[in-house]
Image: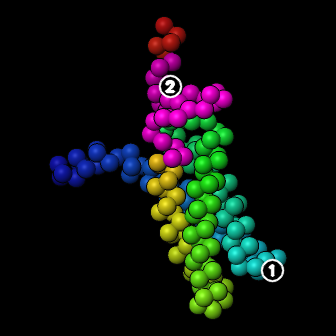
Amino acid sequence: MRIAHALYQRFSQLIHELAKFGTVGALAFVVQLSTTNLMWTVFGVSALAGQAVGTVVATMVAFLGHRHWTFNTRARTGLGREYLLFFIMNGVGLLIQLGCVGTTVGILGLDSPLARNISGNFIGVGLGTLFRFWSYRLWVFPAEAKHMSVASHETTAPPAARAAEEPARQA
């Protein structure tokens, strides 16, 4: 039991971030899956374009959830910086998804809704999710702000640290 408790204590922040990341990701996945399939079936959009539109819409939902809930205890390095890096990292994640769909449709010749969903919405999203979690923690929402923009007006301390400092400033 001591080992399990010690491991939990050591990795508790990571465990909590993973749980929140999964929750926000599940919501964004539902948005992405619904939007992508809507683009394909109702609007007749191509496989790659439909996947791209669904991913962009889900990315906007995910940014709000991750910034304000999943990684809310991490440094704030400026809304513009975080937003830009978030979309760049999601662009890489999108390329991973598109690569999976492109391989399935273009190379393997499997162009059914089932094949598109398996390749893009399950395999592609799965691989993209691994990349996104790693990149968000490393670059988008870092533990500490190492590079602050002069134009940024936001404090770099996590919200919990700012709350703890407030009484000291008022005294």
Q: Which residues are magenta?
A: 139-166
Q: Residues within 10 Å of mark 2 (few under 14, many from 20)?
A: few
Write the residue at 63% across / 80% down. Answer: 102
Foreground residue, 85 or 16? 85
Above or below, 81 against 132 in this view is above
Location of mark 2 (residue): 162
Direction from residue 41 to residue 169 in the image, left or right: left
Above or below, 107 against 87 in this view is below
Disc 1, SS: loop
Q: Position of residue 135 (x, y in %)?
A: 50, 53
Write the residue at 70% across / 60% down. Answer: 57
Direction from residue 102 to residue 19 in the image, left or right: left
Q: Position of residue 120 (x, y in %)?
A: 60, 76
Q: Does the residue at mark 2 contact the one at mark 1 (Cβ under 8 Å)?
A: no
Q: Residues within 10 Å of mark 1 (few under 14, many from 20)?
A: few
Disc 2, SS: helix
Location of mark 1 (residue): 44
Q: Residue furthest top?
A: 171
Three-letter amino acid code of the residue under disc 2: Arg
Foreground residue, 113 or 156? 156
Q: Quadrant of residue 104?
A: bottom right
Write the residue at 48% across / 15% down. Answer: 167
Three-letter amino acid code of the residue under disc 1: Gly
